[in-house]
């Protein structure tokens, strides 16, 4: 196996850790994304990261944020990533740059431009010339910006990540693909280490084992698991055997867990999304973490130490504490190896199944002792080398054992200290703890009482002064004098918050946003084929529904409001799953209209549904009239197990066998004079279906359909024998396509431009008072006057409340985001019920759309809230 090597630069990586210009460092890194924040807040957020004690930010660079349409590039305003990197340098932070081409990040399409899916021969994230040609165009734009800002010559960039969690993706030639990306980076003058992160521990799957591409690991463990340490140590050893450090490029945000990772050997710890942000406009993804998929909210917040509005949470102080421990130990920790304790450690509380330690450079160990109990519970007792020590619940003190103290002005060895060492100077050691601190020095043992806030506790042992501070004071520590007197920075007062305001008076526009005609098409095209990469489109036709009871909608993605004969059906958001639509009330020749809105393209690659595949297009899909339904559950021949010849004839799934879980194949001929759809009802486990001995495809319970052209076909269904599975039924739907579609589109630029036309004096607006009642499918453009509101340094949240509505908001010429207030699929991210207006952004325009459902569409209230967390 070839071993990656770090290129010569101011940054060097080897088994001992990270060296930046010859100085060994443990690097704490916070995700901070310029594209999820107003430009006006970049500096303040970067300074906030620096003040947390973290020394680095990692930042994705989303390809489709900068290439707005094929060949149309933008690096201005909020897209000026060069200015963001320069601010990071001015702030004193390092940067790990992650330009993709794929980034995931719950971002629209994982940052892959939507139009890539229009080329049937282009295969994303593959060693394939069409895709690589597109990547080259992106890298030609972005890599020079990074090369110009590499450390140490001209900027803060200390590493560049290629791709992202490729081990989750079915890449056919990983080595070829990563080699191509590496070579492009080198050709653009990237000299800092090139890294590639594994999402599920498959190092070779993430890097292709390509020389010059250094593996990193993403860990997202259960914070309460007792088994984190041995798993992480295993990867630390694997990488050490390659003479490389353990770089954790993504992980959980909780510092109790981060301490465990540090003790297990990590040289870089980069909890994902410590500093939260926003998915402005049409940039959220669809499909991640759902059943089978979900929608990302406008808020992008997973509980990091800084909220989306910039408020510091309790973990922020925990970050400062951990950073102080790292600083206090300095090169002792940065050069430390990872192992297990040399002294016995037991506990009367839930803790690690195998504690980790760092073998400190110069002697001694740092032991992580996690108390996995619930916050607020009583402290527990650990016994370290026979000495009982107190450990607070929901904590992970980093205890020192057998540490020589000569470099800190004391001729002796620290046998044990149970609190966090946050400062060390000549003859003075300062600890942080919320419980008593036990210190063993030479033959002396002393217990320092639990310090209260503002009341340090002190002890002296053989001339060495020991100081204990409450965690709240430790984060404000500026200096400790030789006599043990501490100097604390002033506490920062919490900002006051203004009360929420309910808006009642708004102005409703008479006009609607302009639609751009997009031609007449026999079958519904994808929105991307019409030039809409973010936004929405309308499909219109007429259909003869005489004698038709239902329609079949196939491949609709991603939000479809369908109206048939004037009846608006409930919104379809099935990620491309086939939908049967009851139209018995229509009859005759009727109008059909579908408004399709792109919430976002899939950011992951989920094979269960077509719209969840990476690179899948958006649009109406195909609409069919169902001309007949035939049960085809019987007369399947059985092949497999001990079935002999002639093949037995059974119902689908009806073969009896003692071989549970072993695949059985059922075959039969299916005839249809028209196109048809085979519907497998009762699918539990995935089954394999082939038509006319072609390549088998997997059919899931989420979308148990197979489309067939007219004619006679030999269909094979292979499924594991599952006698308790309930059996399968099969029906054949005869289909005729609905054709003759007239299309019109409104991309996000058109909608945003119309929203920006707000003029309070315009006579073509009506003053109205909430609540606002709408019909299903009806829309209202509302302008809200914000000029009379008190200012807020965190902006304010807009919380619409109502039934059966979707709301899109704009301010200061930019789309804020969208809310789906009722009857919606699953959401993830931050608060999915608010829009955020950043401080200084003027005006507010809302587009409210009524949807069909159990109640009548209504915008009941509009509340403006002043957030502080």
Image (tube, rainbow, N blue to C red):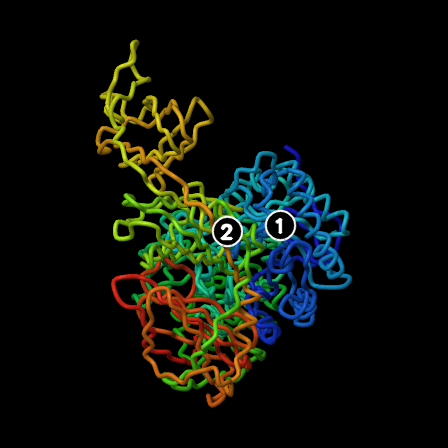
Residue nearest the observer in this picture, 56 or 145: 145
Numbered circle sitting on residue 603: 2
The kind of secondary structure element at disc 1 is: loop
Residue at (40% x, 57% y) in the render? 370
Q: Which image quadrant: the N terminus?
A: top right
Image spot of residue 529 (x, y percent): 56, 50
Horizontal side of residue 684 vs 126, given as left or right: left
Residue nearest the observer in this picture, 427 or 727: 727
Residue at (37% x, 24% y) in the render? 716
- Counting residues from the start of the chain, the first of labels 1 and 2 encountered is 1
Horizontal side of residue 459 vs 12, given as left or right: left
Instruction: State which quadrant residue 237 falls in.
Output: top right
Residue at (53% x, 38% y) in the render? 170
Numbered circle sitting on residue 101: 1
Other residues around mark 1 within 10 Å, as few (<14) / some (14–19) / many (≥20): many
Numbered circle sitting on residue 783: none
Other residues around mark 2 within 10 Å, as few (<14) / some (14–19) / many (≥20): many
Residue nearest the observer in this picture, 324 or 27: 27
Horizontal side of residue 407 vs 717, given as left or right: right
Image spot of residue 799 (x, y percent): 39, 75
Residue at the top extreme of this rendering: 645
Q: In this rendering, is residue 608 above or below 60? A: above
The residues bearing labels 1 and 2 have C-alpha atoms spaced at a distance of: 12 Å
Image spot of residue 640 (x, y percent): 33, 17
């Amino acid at each position: 196996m070839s071993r990656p090597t770090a290129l010569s630069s101011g940054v060097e990586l080897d088994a001992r850790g990270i060296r930046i210009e010859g100085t060994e460092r443990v690097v704490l890194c916070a995700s901070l994304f310029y594209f999820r924040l107003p430009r006006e807040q970049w500096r303040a957020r970067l300074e906030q990261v620096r003040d947390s004690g973290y020394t680095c930010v990692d930042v994705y660079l989303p390809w489709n944020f900068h290439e707005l349409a094929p060949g149309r590039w933008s690096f201005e305003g909020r897209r000026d990533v060069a200015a963001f990197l320069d601010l990071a340098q001015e702030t004193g932070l390092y940067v790990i740059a992650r330009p993709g081409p794929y980034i995931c990040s719950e971002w629209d399409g994982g940052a892959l431009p939507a139009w890539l899916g229009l080329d049937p021969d282009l295969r994303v994230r593959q060693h394939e010339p069409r895709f690589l040609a597109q990547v080259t165009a992106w890298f030609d734009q972005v890599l020079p910006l990074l090369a110009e800002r590499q450390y140490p010559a001209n900027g803060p960039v200390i590493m560049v990540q290629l791709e992202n969690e490729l081990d989750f993706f079915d890449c056919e030639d990983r080595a070829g693909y990563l080699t191509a990306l590496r070579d492009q980076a080198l050709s653009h003058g990237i000299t800092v280490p090139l890294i590639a992160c594994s999402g599920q521990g498959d190092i070779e799957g993430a890097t292709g084992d390509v020389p010059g591409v250094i593996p990193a690991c993403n860990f997202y463990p259960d914070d309460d698991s007792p088994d984190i340490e041995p798993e992480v140590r295993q990867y630390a050893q694997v990488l050490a055997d390659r003479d490389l450090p353990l770089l954790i490029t993504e992980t959980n945000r909780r510092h109790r867990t981060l301490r465990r990772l540090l003790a297990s050997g990590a040289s870089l710890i980069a909890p994902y999304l410590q500093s939260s942000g926003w998915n402005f406009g049409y940039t959220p993804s669809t499909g991640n973490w759902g059943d089978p998929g979900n929608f990302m909210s406008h808020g992008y917040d997973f509980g990091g130490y800084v909220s989306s509005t910039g408020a510091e949470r309790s973990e922020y102080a925990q970050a400062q504490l951990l950073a102080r421990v790292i600083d206090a130990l300095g090169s002792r920790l940065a050069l430390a190896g990872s192992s297990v304790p040399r002294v016995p450690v037991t506990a009367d509380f839930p803790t690690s199944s195998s504690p980790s330690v760092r073998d400190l450079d110069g002697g001694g160990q740092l032991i992580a002792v996690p108390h996995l109990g619930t916050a607020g519970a009583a402290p527990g007792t650990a016994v370290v080398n026979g000495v009982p020590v107190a450990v607070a619940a929901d904590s992970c003190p980093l205890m020192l054992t057998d540490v020589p103290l000569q470099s800190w002005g004391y001729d002796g060895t620290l046998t044990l200290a149970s609190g966090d060492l946050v400062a060390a100077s000549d003859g003075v050691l300062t600890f942080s703890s919320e419980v008593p601190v036990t210190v063993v020095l030479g033959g002396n043992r002393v217990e320092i009482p639990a310090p209260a806030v503002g009341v340090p506790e002190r002890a002296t042992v053989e001339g060495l002064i020991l100081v204990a501070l409450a965690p709240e004071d430790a984060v404000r520590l500026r200096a400790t004098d030789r006599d043990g007197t501490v100097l604390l920075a002033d506490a920062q007062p919490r900002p006051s918050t203004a009360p929420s305001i309910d808006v009642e008076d708004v102005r409703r526009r008479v006009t609607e946003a302009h639609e751009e005609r997009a031609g007449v098409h026999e079958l519904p095209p994808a929105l991307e084929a019409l030039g809409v990469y973010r936004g929405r489109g309308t499909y219109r036709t007429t259909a003869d529904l005489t004698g038709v009871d239902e329609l079949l909608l196939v491949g609709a993605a991603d939000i479809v409001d369908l109206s048939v004969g004037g009846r608006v059906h409930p919104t379809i958001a099935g990620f491309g799953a086939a939908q049967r639509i009851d139209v018995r009330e229509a009859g005759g020749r009727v109008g059909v209209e579908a408004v399709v809105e792109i919430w976002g393209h899939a950011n992951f690659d989920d094979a269960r549904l077509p719209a969840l595949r990476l690179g899948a297009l958006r649009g109406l899909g195909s609409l069919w009239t169902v001309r007949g339904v035939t049960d085809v559950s019987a007369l399947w021949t059985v092949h497999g197990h001990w079935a002999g010849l002639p093949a037995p004839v059974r119902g689908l799934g009806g073969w009896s066998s003692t071989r549970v879980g072993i695949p059985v194949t059922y075959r039969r001929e299916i005839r249809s004079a028209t196109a048809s759809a085979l519907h497998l009802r009762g699918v539990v486990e995935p089954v394999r279906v082939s038509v006319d001995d072609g390549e088998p495809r997997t059919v899931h319970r989420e979308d148990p359909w197979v489309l067939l052209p007219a004619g006679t076909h030999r269909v094979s269904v292979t499924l594991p024998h599952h006698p308790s599975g309930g059996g399968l039924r099969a029906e054949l739907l005869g289909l005729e396509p609905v054709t003759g579609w007239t299309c019109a589109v409104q991309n996000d630029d058109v909608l945003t431009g119309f929203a920006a036309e707000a003029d309070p004096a315009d006579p073509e607006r009506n003053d109205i008072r909430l609540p606002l009642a709408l019909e299903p499918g009806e829309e209202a453009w509302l302008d809200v006057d914000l000029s009379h509101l008190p200012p807020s340094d965190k902006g304010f949240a807009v919380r619409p409340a109502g039934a059966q509505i979707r709301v899109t908001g704009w301010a200061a010429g930019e789309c804020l985001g969208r809310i789906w207030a009722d009857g919606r699929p699953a959401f993830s991210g931050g608060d999915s019920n608010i829009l955020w207006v950043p401080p200084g952004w003027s005006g507010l325009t809302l587009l409210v759309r009524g949807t069909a459902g159990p109640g009548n569409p209504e915008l009941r209230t509009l509340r403006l809230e002043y957030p502080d967390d």
